[in-house]
Amino acid sequence: MWWFRPERLCAPVVVGLVAALGLLLMPPAPTALALSFVVDSTTDAVDALPGDGVCATAPLPSEGVRCTLRAAIMEANFLAGSHAITLPAGNCVLTIAPTGSNGDSSGDLNVSASLAFSGAGAATTIIDGNGTDRVFTVQKSVSLDFDGVTLRNGITPCCFHPCLACVFPPDPGAEIFAPATDGDVSVTLKNSVAGDGSTLNGGTKYAVVAKTVTVINSTFGPRGGLSAADSVKISGSSFTDSPISGATEVSTSKFEASSSVVATAPCAEGDRFVKLRA
């Protein structure tokens, strides 16, 4: 004979209540809010407390608490989502040397959130890799938009000669490196300058590497090649022939160009527009 036993019902009810209480007590996940950060210092310094939604360094000598470019990106990375970063006129030189750990607090600027950078104009707002590392490395499927900014002096490993190819092929992406293995990354440069780092680009032919690249009314220097796994679109922009390959190289499966010109560099071999690689 089956007898009613209250504990048969109580046990699952208690377990359910405990589970529900546990969910209530769990710390909330970071919220993907669309925030705007206004950079007010060209110093390269880290954020004091990434994830609090405030771009603020520890007090800097003679400056106090500031919002730097690196601090703004660190905040955006922690919060995820899409954010805007406004940059002042000035030269933001990346002075914190890479440590080998590829963390956010040293070396190049690691990006894992979608960001829109607005500068005061490419002639005055400069993000300078300082010849010690890349400028940007993108680590997730995000979008990067640059308007009115110059990206220069990123470097990738290479034995360099100003008019000859590298003894060893360099890694690509001196200014922006977003390998296809890390996700679908789109990069847009508008009214901007890239690949203009003199001999500091380490000999790489590709200043920008991403899934898709769009270039609008921008200028690419002699180390300003593009590599896109999906497509490249160029309009109203100028390219300087590369002293490494004899032409600005665009490696992509789909290419569109309109109203664009090319100038000849001192070491270039001929006056060509772009050399495409499938």
Image (tube, rainbow, N blue to C red):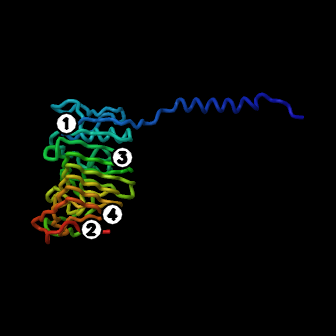
How far is the residue under mark 3 from the one under mark 4?
26 Å
Which residue in the protein does label 3 denote? 112
**Residue at the outermost bottom position:** 269
Q: Tell me which label, 3 or 1, sits earlier in the chain.
A: 1
User: Mark 2 and mark 3: span between their CA atoms?
Assistant: 29 Å
Q: Which mark is residue 160?
A: none
| Residue 44 screen position, x and y as percent | 21, 41
Q: At x 63% / y 29%, what residue is drawn?
A: 17
Q: Amino acid at mark 3?
A: Ser
What is the three-letter code of the residue carrying label 2? Leu
Secondary structure of the residue carrying numbered label 2: strand
Residue type at tag 4: Lys
Task: Tell me the quadrant of the picture where the N terminus can be found.
Answer: top right
Question: What residue is pinned by disc 1?
Answer: 41
Outermost residue on the right side: it is: 1
Disc 2 target residue: 276
Mark nearer the viewer, 3 or 4: 4
Q: Which residue is mark 4?
A: 254
Query: Mark 2 near mark 4, Cβ–Cβ under 8 Å?
Result: no
Q: Earlier in the sequence, mark 2 or mark 3?
A: 3
When the figure is inspected, residue 27 is found, relative to residue 222, above or below; the finding is above
Which secondary structure, mark 1?
A: loop
Q: Mark 2 or mark 1, which has the lower sequence index?
A: 1
Give the answer, above or below, for where 228 lies relative to 167.
above
Against 124, residue 16 (above or below) is: above
